[in-house]
Amino acid sequence: MKEKTFGKAALQVAVAGLAATPVLVGLEGMVSGPQFLHVTAPWPVDLDSHFRFLSGFFLAVGIAWYSCIPGIETKTERFRLLAACTFSGGLARLFSLLVAGAPSAGHIAGLCVELLAMPALVYVTSVVPLPGWLTRMIPSSATTDNSIAEQTDTPHAVPIEKNLPGPADEMWRSHLELAEQHRQRKDRPAEQREYRAAVRAWRAARSA
């Protein structure tokens, strides 16, 4: 458990550090315009408009990265979407390098983050596990108690009653069984999707 917690914390720290760049650079670009890149005025108005727009988008992406940090193990879809957006920007930057020449050291560093660090972080998210309480929701055939109520590491953890009657019981159990199958196939997005569906079905059964 300590290793899992450390892995999650390390990923959160990495995201926090990397996200600072688009936030700070995007904010400065919005305020200063092309002058931020030491361009001599005057410059075309369209260039100013486009540069500030892209700076605003850069800022928004950085803020969105920060939104992934709380409960990062449950934000896989958002994390990968943002990584894909960042990677796409890196490809555009690489094209510029090929057709226009090498930029300054800061932009080279950004290129490395976009094309190397992003795929690495996406890989890391595939091995950071879901909260342990979710994986303990599947009742074992050896369980003889009427409920599964364990001390867990998640404030939202709730005991799952073993003998819930009716279709609602079958629904959340079926989602958990599918999640386990996806886990064995190492299909993490599908595994998380089924776990969340199981939690929703269980809550619906409890509120019915």
Image (tube, rainbow, N blue to C red):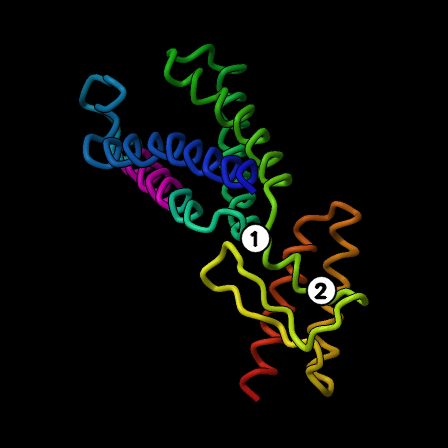
Q: Residue at x 66, y 59 (%)?
A: 136
- 63 vs 48, left or right, is right
Q: Circle 1 sits in a helix, a strand or a loop, which is it?
A: loop
Image quadrant assignment for residue 144: bottom right
Q: Amino acid at mark 1?
A: Pro
Image quadrant assignment for residue 165: bottom right
- 182 vs 36, left or right, is right
Determine crowd level at label 2: few under 14, some 14-19, many 20+ residues with C-alpha closer than 10 A: some
Horizontal and vertical percent position of residue 48: 26, 33
Q: Residue at x 61, y 46 (%)?
A: 129
Q: Residue at x 81, y 67 (%)?
A: 141
Q: Nearer the viewer, residue 208 or 197?
A: 208
**Which quarter shows the C terminus?**
bottom right
**Which quarter shows the N terminus?**
top right
Horizontal and vertical percent position of residue 164: 68, 82
Horizontal and vertical percent position of residue 84: 55, 39
Determine crowd level at label 1: few under 14, some 14-19, many 20+ residues with C-alpha closer than 10 A: some
Q: Mark 1 = which residue?
A: 131
- 41 vs 104, left or right, is left
Q: Mark 2 = which residue?
A: 138
- Residue extent of the magenta highlight: 49-63
Q: Nearer the viewer, residue 38 or 120?
A: 120
Q: Amino acid at mark 2?
A: Ile
